[in-house]
Amino acid sequence: MTEVMQTTRGPARRVMRGVVLGVALFALAACAERIRNHGYVPTDDDLSQITVGVDTRDTVEEVLGAPSTSGVADASGFYYVRSQFRHFAYLEPKEINRELVAVTFDGDGVVQNIERYGLEDGQTVVLSRRVTTNEGDGDGILQQLLRSLGNFVPSTL
């Protein structure tokens, strides 16, 4: 009888150890660091093909590719942005590297300047939050509708 119990307990223990080991490996793999890249920045070799004072928007876009973004208000420049984010376990992703290449143009669309910025050059931008206040007397929409029903005069239609 003891031999039967020992033989049935042996495989069950091995299976249980395998399950525990599998769960532990899965938990460990979930905590692995991941680096994710976003965006595109041209290389120094690509930038050396652009001549300040000679090349135009079209030639810059042909050589460097489409920009990540461009000047919104006056279309003054092309901006190429690349960021690296570190993802680790359940923590919030953290930006560990950012690179920005700014190609600015003059009024005629000719390259005026090429600059490269890194994460250390960045500044924190404080966003202002504007909230529109309700100038009404605090009544809800339903109360306003019901009150206006009493003021309904058919002759005004």
Image (cartoon, grey):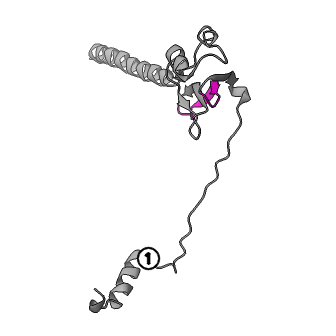
Q: Quadrant of residue 152?
A: bottom left
Is residue 138 placed above or below 129 in the rendered structure? Answer: below
Front-lying residue, 103 or 94: 103
**Residue 32 visible in this rendered orientation of the protein:** no
Magenta stretch: dominant secondary structure:
strand
Taking 69 as reference, is 96 left or right? right
Which residue is at 64% across, 13% downward?
51
Which residue is at 56% across, 27% downward?
88
Please state the horizontal and vertical placement of residue 122, each as a whole percent of the image: 70, 32
Residue at the outermost front position: 108
Local packing at callout 1 (Cα closer than 10 Å; few below 14, some 14-19, many 20+) is: few
Quadrant including the C terminus: bottom left
Please state the horizontal and vertical placement of residue 129, each as a whole percent of the image: 61, 55
Name the residue carrying label 1.
Answer: 140
Please state the horizontal and vertical placement of residue 121, each as a whole percent of the image: 73, 28
- Is 96 inside the magenta-drawn segment? yes
Which element type, helix, strand or loop, lies under badge 1? Answer: loop
**Residue 14 visible in this rendered orientation of the protein:** yes
Q: Identify which amino acid the numbered label 1 is placed on.
A: Gly
Front-lying residue, 76 or 119: 76
Q: Quadrant of residue 49?
A: top right
Magenta highlight range: 90-108
- Is 99 inside the magenta-drawn segment? yes
Front-lying residue, 50 or 30: 50
Front-lying residue, 28 or 8: 28
